[in-house]
Image (cartoon, rainbow, N blue to C red):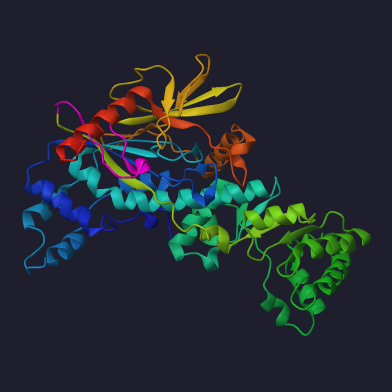
Amino acid sequence: MTQKARVPPALLTDLYELTMAYGYWKEQMLDHEAVFHLFFRQQPFNGGYTITCGLDDAIDYLLNFEFYPDDLTYLAELRGSDGEPLFENAFLDYLHSLRFACNVDAIPEGNVVFPHEPLLRVHGSLLQCQLFETALLNILNFQTLIATKSARICLAARGQPVIEFGLRRAHGPDGAVAASRAAYIGGCVATSNVLAGKVFGIPVRGTHAHSWIMSFRTELEAFQAYAEAMPGNCIFLVDTYDTIGGVHQAVEVGRQLKSMGKELIGVRLDSGDLAYLSIQARDILDQAGFQSTKILASNDLDEHVISSLKEQGALIDLWGVGTKLVTAFDQPALGGVYKLSATRVKGGAWQRKVKLSEQAVKVSNPGSLQVRRFEHRNEYLADMIYDDLSGISKGRVIVDIADVTMRRRIAANAKCRDLLVPIFRQGNLVYERPSISESRTLAQTELGRFPSGVKRLLNPHIYPVGLELGLHESKARLMQCARSAAGEVE
């Protein structure tokens, strides 16, 4: 599998994207422009931050967006409820000639983001913008979720290496490859997934399974055979029969490795009381002169289990995390959305759009949105969501989206930068794509610039994010007009 082979085809979409595109075409709305934003409404895992991820795959998707002849043959065969063809041939001809030509701005992968902040802004033909919705959500929702889970696990490990072990439990082949990529950006140091290693250049690590031990007459023979085959890569899985006995057997083979000029790299604990067993294993190893031999733990780990083991005094050096990382076990979906926020007939004035809801947090934000992050003394203070179409007109005041009575004035001396950067202009890539290692480093650097309370596992501090005062007032006016137009009682 190559990176190109992973690019989603144009038909990786929901049918309603195509029926809406057909409707725009029928209504002769090809000269209508739109702005859409991709964002999420709630922090995943009850946490205080999110790591954005998936932009690089989204870029590949947009660069290669095309309807192929067999795609159009399939679409021509679709029928509506009346038994008639769903799409006219002339529309399918239009799709055949369609090429991506939008402007896209995005927050680069590895940045820390918060609810309601646009991770991606798409500006262009209304029809084209609509077609991209499903695939962009599919890509960014999943990878952002996994990168965030990885960051939480790595923070819980307090600087000790975390290896992603999740391939066999992931949601299908590409789910596994995408998860390995996102986990590495989130902070993991390596993966067991060899294909992800090939495609992305992620370091790969691995030991052996219980089946290796069980294939030999004794555990000692199994360790000896592995040491003979892989003398420079010996991390022995010691819990097939008896964990403490397994550590003693590993020490015996470790002495043989020393005589060969090699090292016993580590032992792996995969079951039982990991805190108790790690303390016992460390004592056995140290007493035998293997102070540099590492203890690797696995067995359904996540950030909460790792944090608990740390509190219990576990002497674990490396962490292998699989199922609960690549499946985002305790929250399997981010819930990102893609909302229309402004339209115009090409060359005309922009009309800001707002979607209403009885829940304040589900009312969409109008305009062409940008995120400005403020900092003081190298620590981030607050984020402001503002409308690029009108700029910042009311000073440095932000209004909480969920509670409009909560307002914050940002100090005049606070430095700031805008988070969304140009990715495409009229379909042309203008962004210098960072390497996966650069995105991983960015995630670690950015997390370090937020207050420690934001990164707590339990009851994290809520980082201030709000609408610029002028945007808040514009949104309130649009909401009032929309409700009046809908005939609601004021």
Give residue 365's position: percent from left, percent from top.
32, 35
Q: Give the left or right position of residue 199, taking residue 152 as reference.
A: left
Q: Is residue 440 above or below residue 77?
A: above
Q: Looking at the image, which residue is at 46% across and 32% down?
A: 465
Residue 355 among magenta residues: yes
Q: Give the left or right position of residue 182, taking residue 364 as reference.
A: right
Give residue 151's position: percent from left, percent from top.
58, 47
Is residue 182 something one can see in this rendering? Answer: no
Q: Looking at the image, which residue is at 57% across and 51% down?
A: 150
Q: Give the left or right position of residue 48, taking residue 230 as reference.
A: left
Residue at far top of view: 413
User: Quadrant of the rendered structure where residue 271 is?
Assistant: bottom right
Instruction: Please name whichever residue, 261 or 350, is drawn nearer the observer in this view of the structure.
Output: 350
Q: Is residue 207 above or below residue 453?
A: below
Q: Looking at the image, which residue is at 46% across and 51% down?
A: 143
Give residue 6's position: percent from left, percent from top.
39, 56
Give residue 14's position: percent from left, percent from top.
26, 58
Q: Give the left or right position of residue 347, taking residue 183 as reference.
A: left
Q: Quadrant of the C terminus?
A: top left
Residue 352 among magenta residues: yes
Q: Looking at the image, which residue is at 70% across and 46% down?
A: 158
Instruction: Please name whichever residue, 383 or 92, is drawn nearer the observer in this view of the structure.
Output: 383
Instruction: Please name whichever residue, 34 or 48, is drawn nearer the observer in this view of the structure.
Output: 48
Q: Magenta residues?
A: 347-367
Instruction: Please name whichever residue, 205 or 401, is drawn nearer the observer in this view of the structure.
Output: 401
Residue at far front of view: 489
Q: Is residue 53 above or below residue 270?
A: above
User: Quadrant of the rendered structure where residue 405 is?
Assistant: top left
Predominant secondary structure, magenta span: loop
